[in-house]
Image (tube, rainbow, N blue to C red):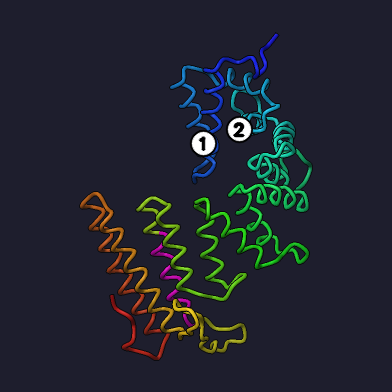
Amino acid sequence: MEKTYDHYSDTTKSLLAELADLVHALTFQDGSDDELVGRIQQWTITKNTTSKHLFKLLRNSIHIPQYACLLAFFYNYSIGTKYNPRKTLKYYQLAADMGDGFGANQTGMCYGWAIGVKQCDLRMEIRYYRISAELGHPQGQSNLAHVIKRRDVPEFCDKREVLFWYLKATETGYPAAFSYVADCYKNGYGTMVDYHMMLRWYTKYLKKKSVVTGLDFLYTKLLEIITSKNKATPNGQKRKPKRLKGTLRNTRCSREQQFALAKNIVTSTFQYLLKDSDTQDRRIRYREKLRNFTTGAQNSWRSNSKVEDNFPTS
């Protein structure tokens, strides 16, 4: 007869607790499924154990929410067992019903991606994301906002709630949420369009990413902003300049001032990257990127504006 969790040794319990921490940490990182599974398999080797052994331990520990989650995780990624979507949903849902935020988030994903069910179920997806969000799980908070925004269903869609949950997710440092908050400020989703706030949040997102990835991301975003300064409306007419909220409270600044602030922020961000870079090759690359950005943005600004000499300089 197999032992249950209550009869495991302290060493075995510590092993499972360490595995749970590893899986939760990996789900916060960007990466493919193969990379995620590879990291777990590498970890099992360092612990002198096997995936099948861990699977058996988890199977006898499902009365504990986090281990019910891990068992579902193993079924979903074929770790120590065969892929079984129905059992994936079953054990994630079991963990969610026991009050586990991660389990509720994963249950929402199952309903959203039709894992263990015949077709996607938007109501159940949002229901479990909301449970996860209210339990304080950052992925659940971000996913709840994301699915409401993406689906754009009137009965679920509250733009202010979308921004609220993205902001809640950033409080625990969930990387993707920083980018989503920035997108809300960029597109005026749940708030006023504010390019300065957008860039502040993109910069925060940048610092959560690797330096090289973040540099390319920010470079692309800033050129996108500058070149969209005078986008045409659907009837072909130019949009009238808007007066948007700037960085100072109780003040309003022109669109030109908004772009001046944007330029200053990206310049300071590149300077931060230069200072933080650890090799000469990277420093050379960053200087070239900054030079290209300044030249490209200035040319774009002048081609889209009657103002020839007011492009901000660092």
State left or right for residue 170 relative to residue 234: left
Q: Are marks 1 and 2 in contact (CB under 8 Å)?
A: yes
State left or right for residue 26 relative to residue 123: left
Q: Picture quarter containing residue 200?
A: bottom left
- Residue at the disc numbered 1: 36
Q: CA distance from mark 1 to mark 2?
A: 9 Å
The residue lying at 46 percent from left, 20 percent from top is: 47
**Crowd band around label 1 with a 10 angstrom C-alpha radius: few (<14), some (14–19), many (20+):** some
> From this viewpoint, which residue is outermost toward the bottom?
306
State left or right for residue 130 relative to residue 174: right
- Residue at the disc numbered 2: 77
Q: Position of residue 140 (x, y in %)?
A: 63, 49
Please identify the dominant SS of the magenta region.
helix
Magenta residues, as a range? 217-230
Give the residue type at disc 2.
Tyr
Residue 221 versus residue 284 in the image, above or below:
below
Q: Nearer the viewer, residue 32 or 93?
A: 93
Give the residue type at disc 1.
Leu
Q: In which quadrant will I find the C terminus? A: bottom left
State left or right for residue 46 relative to residue 239: left
Q: In which quadrant will I find the N terminus? A: top right
